[in-house]
Amino acid sequence: MTAPNDLAAYWMPFTANRQFKAAPRLFAGASGMHYRMTDGRQILDGTAGLWCVNAGHCRPEIAAAIAAQARELDYATAFQMGHPAAFTLAARLARLAPGDLDHVFYVNSGSEAVETALKIALAYHHARGDSRRVRLIGRERGYHGVNFGGMAVGGIGNNRKQFGPGLGAVDHLPHTHDLSRNAFSRGQPDWGAHLADDLLRLIALHDASTIAAVIVEPMAGSTGVLVPPKGYLERLREICDAHGILLIFDEVITGFGRLGASFAAERFGVIPDLMTAAKGLTNAAVPMGAVFARAHVHDALMTGPDAAIELFHGYTYSGHPLACAAAHATLDIYEKEDLFARAARIEPHFEAAVHRLDDGKNVVDVRNIGIAAGIEFAQRDGRPGVRAYDVFLKCLDMGLLTRQAGDVIALSPPLIASEAEIDTMAGILAEAAATVA
Ligand SMILES: Cc1ncc(COP(=O)(O)O)c(C=O)c1O
């Protein structure tokens, strides 16, 4: 593929458009652990695309499944009609998910999964005759996509400030990241479980009878890999249970092996009432997301006459045949290659490799869990993100794709990464950090 010579028309998402168009970075192809740029350079993928290409790029089995499906059934009307693969996939996903997260609602992205989960939480309380429960609790530094619900419960100032007041009945827990306590932790930090008790403060303030749900990422990825303190998620679960509040895990990043288990819920042994997923569900080959609901949430809505639509919600492309085909083929690969267990097996190597950066220039923290790590840099001249952006550019120059989030460089390679490739990533990152002022 050749590079385009007019970049003006495409308004790029979450991108400094003018800066990018002055010095474009364009992918032309990909295979396994690598991207190929339009200038032919091979780039080692340190971020699985955007935390989504868990099985590596351009897997022929997935491509073949999509192509075959496009020839057989291109689209199936999604409302009051169905197609077999949507049902077989849902049954398979229900078996994969921990606990009784046995019902699957399809969407097309992580953002839509969040909106859907929030709406199901409200509808659940409404169906039980408890429609005063409308308040949603998120967390500072949480990222739940870009739509109005996700933006409201999310906790990133830049993602909110341009877009008005948004949803009203929302509050936030404090985030769990404290460099003075947890810097350079390996896996779950020891300090911070008590921060879950802040939910009791919000309950005292608003009264539990007004709170529908709490939504958190079990591990926050987009704001720079914030690992849950030991006992934190367990405590949230306890408090929610004691007060009739639904707990939602946003597993858009942590689902499908990122933490060495099917989902973070499985790794941490904490089962939420609702769980979102996207990204790794189709290895990112076709956009798709899903919301998993536990039996009691789903069943509460299966009331009224049989002819009644139980949930007035859905998307034209919910359970799209091409996405279902891609997801089936992706799950086949995860199973055949036992990729979640592989991620767990290589986690110690990954941890040791990234912590070789502990003494790196300007590095103020390295943290990790599963196959995810955040390397945090001291701010340059009080300007957030500028140094980490330079590190990102330098890495790309040196043949490694990383992801910059504020002052953090995140590493989250495909789960097929070899130990040698992981060492290469850590080596390039250390060298890039050393050369950046
Ligand atoms: C936890 C979480 N939720 C939601 C989203 C939004 O997903 P999407 O970009 O597919 O809408 C993301 C994206 O990174 C995410 O990390």
Image (cartoon, rainbow, N blue to C red):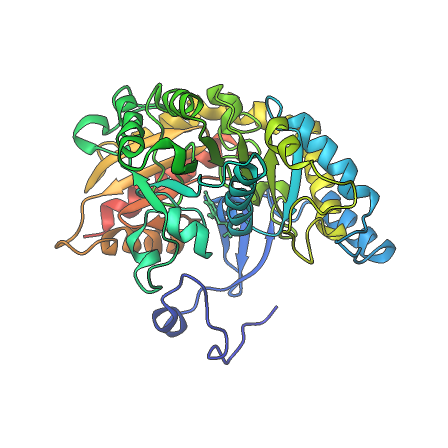
Instruction: Give x and y (percent) for residue 36.
Output: 55, 56
Query: Which of the two residues, 131 or 91, is positioned nearer the viewer here?
Result: 131
The tally of labels here is 0
- Give the answer, above or below, for where 101 lies relative to 129: above
Residue positioned most to the front = 129
- Report whether 413 appears left or right of 308: left
Visible residue check, residue 364: yes
- Report whether 156 appears left or right of 71: left
- Report whether 377 appears left or right of 150: left
Query: Which of the two residues, 188 or 80, is positioned nearer the viewer here?
Result: 80
The residue at the point 53 percent across, 27 percent down is 343
- Can you say which quadrant of the picture contains the N terminus? bottom right
Visible residue check, residue 60: no
Residue positioned most to the right = 72
The residue at the point 51 percent across, 51 percent down is 111
Instruction: Give x and y (percent) for residue 220.
Output: 39, 38
- Give the answer, above or below, for where 127 lies relative to 70: above
Quadrant of the image occupied by residue 256 = top right
Query: Which of the two residues, 39 or 300, is positioned nearer the viewer here?
Result: 300
Instruction: Give x and y (percent) for residue 244.
Output: 45, 27
The residue at the point 68 percent across, 32 percent down is 93
Query: Which of the two residues, 356 or 70, is positioned nearer the viewer here?
Result: 70
- Report whether 32 appears left or right of 434: right
The residue at the point 38 percent across, 35 percent down is 373
Instruction: Give x and y (percent) for residue 3.
Output: 54, 72
